[in-house]
Image (cartoon, rainbow, N blue to C red):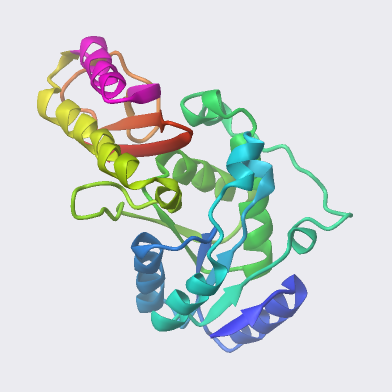
Amino acid sequence: MIIFKSPSSLNNYLIKKKSIGKTIGFVPTMGALHQGHISLIDTAKKANHITVGSIFVNPTQFTNTVDYEKYPITTDQDINLLEACGCDILFLPSKAEVYPKDHHIIHYDLGDLENVLEGKYRPGHFQGVSQVVHRLLEIVIPHDLYVGQKDYQQCMVIKRLVELTGLHVNVHIQHTVRENDGLAMSSRNLRLNSTERNEAIKIYEALNMVKEEIFPGELNNLKNKAVTFLTENKFKVDYVEIADAHTLKLMDHWDGKREVVILVAAYLNEIRLIDNMVL
């Protein structure tokens, strides 16, 4: 595996590879890698000649400075994992390399995606996500981009970003990888102590409860039941929502036909966890 820290060096290297017909698959991450990330790398490797992973904890998408400061950093372990799974290139830039002094900040028209769910509770978050993904795509210029479904709204934002910028990249959304007990794999899980780790499974149980009990008709009572369940199990709930799976429009009523997604965000002590389930 080759490690690049300079955007220009990586860009020049990949342009040469593209000129001889090599396809590039890209998996952007913030590190603290787990099997969910590795599954994205594996998928990229199967479809492309060259697989690029990146590790950069992006400050512009954190609305909580404590969350940013406590985000787990496991770079040496991450490098070993990427080498073991056969990743070809790791892009490991500094903040100054990603956001140089002459970097122009763009405001992205994300529409309603920016104002609901994560956008409502983390204002400015998706502008930060868009900034870093746009910058990384311009450096790596991949054919294919691989992201995980656990960050469902973020996946939709990235697809919107690609439309807005006209970048020629195919966005592939891969299924959430879960622990044996159902907990969605997440870098933030590293911050859970043993007691919290056992309690965290309640988010998955809440999703399954909604899945089992959803019927055509009014949805608010079911959403409130899930909120109560989580609250009784020591969570501080930001939201339990049911939305159109394609537009993310929130729904209070379901016709029984439209594909929907159940989305949850809740704090377990100071650690914020999110998950979702598509029906």
The question of residue 20 being in magenta is answered with no
Instruction: Name the residue rendered at 44%, 53% in the picture.
Output: 187
**Residue 109 place in picture, x, y as percent:** 64, 34
Q: Is residue 229 left or right of residue 76?
A: left
Q: How many marks?
A: 0
Image quadrant in which the C terminus is located? top left
Asked whether 171 or 207 is in front, the reply is 207
Q: In this view, does 221 lie to the left or right of 132?
A: left
Asked whether 233 or 247 is in front, the reply is 233
The question of residue 220 being in magenta is answered with yes
**Region rendered in magenta:** 218-241
Q: In this view, does 24 lie to the left or right of 251?
A: right
**Residue 52 place in picture, x, y as percent:** 53, 74
> What is the quadrant of residue 64 in the picture?
top right
Asked whether 205 or 116 is in front, the reply is 205
Furthest-bottom residue in this view? 20
Against 143, residue 14 (above or below) is: below
Q: In this view, does 252 lie to the left or right of 62?
A: left
Instruction: Name the residue rendered at 74%, 79% in the picture.
Output: 9
Against 8, residue 110 (above or below) is: above
